[in-house]
Image: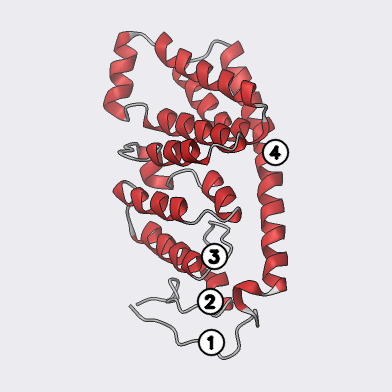
């Protein structure tokens, strides 16, 4: 691994405490909130359509799982709890042979992940950080699905709690993700995020963080440069 020497002229003169970086991160969080709000409406519409049209039950489960992560951020707690109960009910309604087929494929890992993260949001919004972080870690402990392995776990919740100053649970979450989110890119991003967190930097949890780390003058290797 090649470590870059400390930059003599970083883009952000004061590093992670630079007001310009604060402004940049504020704009990113505003973008994430806007995007989540849009996806909330979009995923709700998709779920209602699949449910009301009595389409394949797998489709309804998948659509509600996707919606749940946004519902957990924006809906009243009782609505989020109702959506969790609906998702569990959809699973119970599947015929035995369908359950067996799903179990062989991914064991409902995506749905279990979505439910645990939603429960983490509920607990956190109610001020119960102990339960929130426990549910968050439970959501990926032993996770096993094609989707999670390919795209990684939910980052909306850890982005939120890191902004509130909770570093240890986030680092633990990233560590657990090593069990299933494998490959060079996941390893690179975990490396960047951990380094930024250890330098007390705000993190957006997106690939562009690798470039921002260099601009902040943090001693990290350029993960985009061929080794």
User: Nearer the viewer's eye, disc 2 or disc 4?
Assistant: 2
Looking at the image, residue 81 sits to the left or right of residue 99; the answer is right
Helix, strand or loop status at disc 2: helix
Who comes first in sequence, dot 2 or dot 3? Answer: 3
Who comes first in sequence, dot 4 or dot 1? Answer: 1
The quarter in which the N terminus is drawn is bottom left
Coordinates of residue 186 in the picture (x, y in percent)? 39, 57
Residue at image position (44%, 20%) is 58
Who comes first in sequence, dot 1 or dot 2? Answer: 1
Q: Distance between the residues labelled 2 and 4?
A: 31 Å
Mark carried by residue 7: 1
User: Nearer the viewer's eye, disc 4 or disc 3?
Assistant: 3
Is residue 181 at all visible to an observer of this figure? Answer: no
Who comes first in sequence, dot 3 or dot 1? Answer: 1
Mark carried by residue 209: 3
Residues tagged 4 and 1 counted as in contact (Cβ below 8 A): no
Mark carried by residue 214: 2
Q: Distance between the residues labelled 1 and 2?
A: 8 Å
Residue at image position (52%, 14%) is 55
Q: In this view, does 43 lie above or below 61?
A: below
Q: Is residue 23 above or below residue 216?
A: above
Looking at the image, residue 96 sits to the left or right of residue 46; the answer is left
Q: Which residue lies furthest to the bottom in this view?
A: 8
The image quarter containing residue 24 is bottom right
Q: Mark 4 points at which residue?
A: 38
Looking at the image, residue 170 sits to the left or right of residue 122; the answer is left
Is residue 116 at all visible to an observer of this figure? Answer: yes
Who comes first in sequence, dot 2 or dot 4? Answer: 4
Helix, strand or loop status at disc 4: helix
């Amino acid at each position: 691994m090649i470590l870059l020497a400390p930059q003599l002229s970083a883009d952000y003169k004061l590093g992670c405490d630079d007001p310009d970086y604060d402004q940049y991160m504020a704009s990113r969080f505003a973008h994430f909130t806007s995007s989540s709000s849009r996806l909330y409406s979009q995923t709700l519409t998709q779920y209602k359509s699949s449910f009301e049209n009595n389409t394949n039950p797998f489709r309804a489960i998948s659509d509600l799982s996707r919606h749940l992560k946004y519902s957990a951020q924006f809906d009243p707690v009782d609505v989020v709890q109702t959506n969790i109960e609906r998702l569990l009910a959809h699973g119970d309604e599947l015929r035995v042979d369908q359950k067996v087929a799903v179990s062989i494929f991914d064991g409902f890992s995506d749905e279990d992940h979505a439910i645990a993260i939603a429960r983490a949001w509920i607990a956190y919004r109610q001020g119960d950080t102990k339960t929130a972080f426990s549910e968050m870690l439970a959501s990926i402990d032993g996770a096993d699905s094609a989707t999670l392995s390919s795209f990684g776990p939910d980052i909306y919740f850890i982005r939120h709690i890191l902004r509130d100053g909770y570093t240890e649970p986030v680092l633990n979450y990233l560590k657990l993700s090593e069990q299933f989110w494998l490959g060079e890119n996941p390893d690179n991003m975990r490396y960047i995020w951990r380094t930024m967190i250890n330098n007390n930097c705000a993190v957006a949890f997106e690939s562009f963080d690798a470039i921002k780390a260099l601009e902040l003058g943090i001693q990290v290797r350029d993960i985009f440069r061929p080794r």
